[in-house]
Amino acid sequence: MIKIDDKSRCCGCAACVQCCPKQCISLVADKEGFSYPQVDVALCIDCGKCEKVCPELEQTENYFPMHVYAAVNPVEEVREKSSSGGIFTFLAEAVIAEGGVVFGARFDNDWNVIHDYTETREGLAAFRGSKYVQSKTGETFKQTEQFLKAGRRVLYSGTPCQIKALKLFLRKEYDNLLAVDFVCHGVPSPKVWNMYLEETIAHQGDGKNSVFSHHKQEKMVIESINFRSKLHGWKKYSFALTLSKATADGEKNTVLLSSIFHENAYMQAFLANLSLRPSCYGCPVKGGKSGSDITLGDFWGIEFVSSEIDDDKGISLLIINNPEIEEWLRGKECFLSEYSLKEILGYNTCISNSVAVPVNRDYFFHRLNEVGFYNTLRQTISVRLTDRIRRKFYRLFTL
């Protein structure tokens, strides 16, 4: 029976929920907004299946990649709309062309992030682009298994822990599965995400300087969200939120809220590691342990490694872990140059290392319910600054 005594030992992949033969495991959100399995002991038959699919319990050795490439999608329009070089779409379209199925993360109607699948090229647009929120896998492991057993080619993309969980759930290797993970910084709390959206929308609706302040009677809606807009380039990406509100005469007022990533409040919390799941600070599947065939990411540091191919439009890091996939990709026009892992690791440390736990993480989540997201972030950053000043003065007066 799965039992969570230490929340840092649960990544929230939901493999235990999907494999339970008695359907007696459910996911319940805690006060931080992260979901954890809860077992109905009255129904549990103690079969142990939930423990066998847990990526925290089933550990493997580090695996070093076969090949590391810089790559881009040859279609400029796709590359422009992608977070980095558009290679996910490139791979996904190749699978769709073979009559396959692609699983990825998309927004639902309430702008939460969920896993889903598509069998069409048009359906890939919803999966394109980074989404810095923990996704709900739902029943996608079960659906993946059904497609695989039917002989369909399947591309499943997810975080490294989700890919590890999927491989454990399947219990065997499938030649028709293309498992794709990405270089993961960590997954933020869905609760923090929802609070950020609610407070941002409320501010726009009530603020004196808002374009919506004269139309308070109408409901404001989110039109689009882009975590990685390239309006100012790939390296200086922006968080872009488009809101709209209908006027009394039936017209629509629309506003684009866009800010460079380090100036956006939600991204500040994410990049400061404040809003991450506890398990992310000691990820059990770093260093190639997920069992993925391909690992994707931003090729950060390309301007230092190969400045001649850096056009600031986005370049993907393409890490190949499976020799059969190397053969499948041969001849496809997406590769720019090959590198050693050592050359790129210093600029992409999250390939092998987890981020550190911030000293103020507990404070951040404690204050969240009391004063809201924006106030909490301001107070937390203020405390962090105060700590740095204190340490500086301590060093000055103790030398």
Image: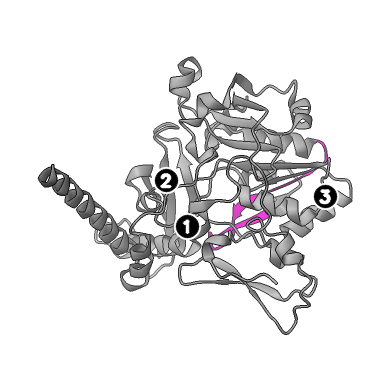
Residue drawn 85% across and 45% down?
Answer: 152
- Residue at position x 53%, y 65% from top? 7
- Verify whether residue 299 appears in magenta: no
Q: CA distance from mark 2 to mark 1?
A: 14 Å
Which tag, 3 or 1, sits closer to the chain's start? Answer: 3
Label 3 vs label 1, nearer the camera = 3
- Quarter of the image for the N terminus: give it: bottom right
Circle 2: element type: strand
213 left or right of 188 in image: left
Q: Which mark is residue 172?
A: 3
Give the quadrant of residue 340.
Answer: top right
Position in image of residue 190 (x %, y %): 50, 62
Question: Few, some or many C-alpha atoms within 10 Å of disc 3 (few <14, some 14-19, many ≥20)?
Answer: few
Mark linked to residue 239: 2
Magenta segment, which residues? 98-116
Number of disc labels:
3
* Distance between the alpha carbons at the discs numbered 3 and 1: 42 Å
- Residue that lies at the very extreme toward the top in this rendered image: 308
Where in the figure is residue 217, as x and y percent of width and height? 38, 70
Closest to the camera, between mark 2 and mark 1, is: 2
- In percent of width and height, residue 258 lies at 38, 45
Residue hosting label 1: 222
Return the residue nearer the eye: 142 or 174: 174
| Amino acid type at mark 3 | Lys
Proximity of marks 2 and 1: CB atoms separated by less than 8 Å? no
What's the residue type where badge 2 is placed?
Phe
Q: Are marks 3 and 1 in contact (CB under 8 Å)?
A: no
- Using residue 14 as the reference point, say whether residue 242 is left or right of it: left
Identify the mark nearer the N-term, 2 or 3. Answer: 3
Residue at the spot 51% in from the left edge and 24% down from the top edge: 343
> At x 48% / y 60%, what residue is drawn?
189
Neighbor class of circle 2 (other Cα within 10 Å; few <14, some 14-19, many 20+) is: many
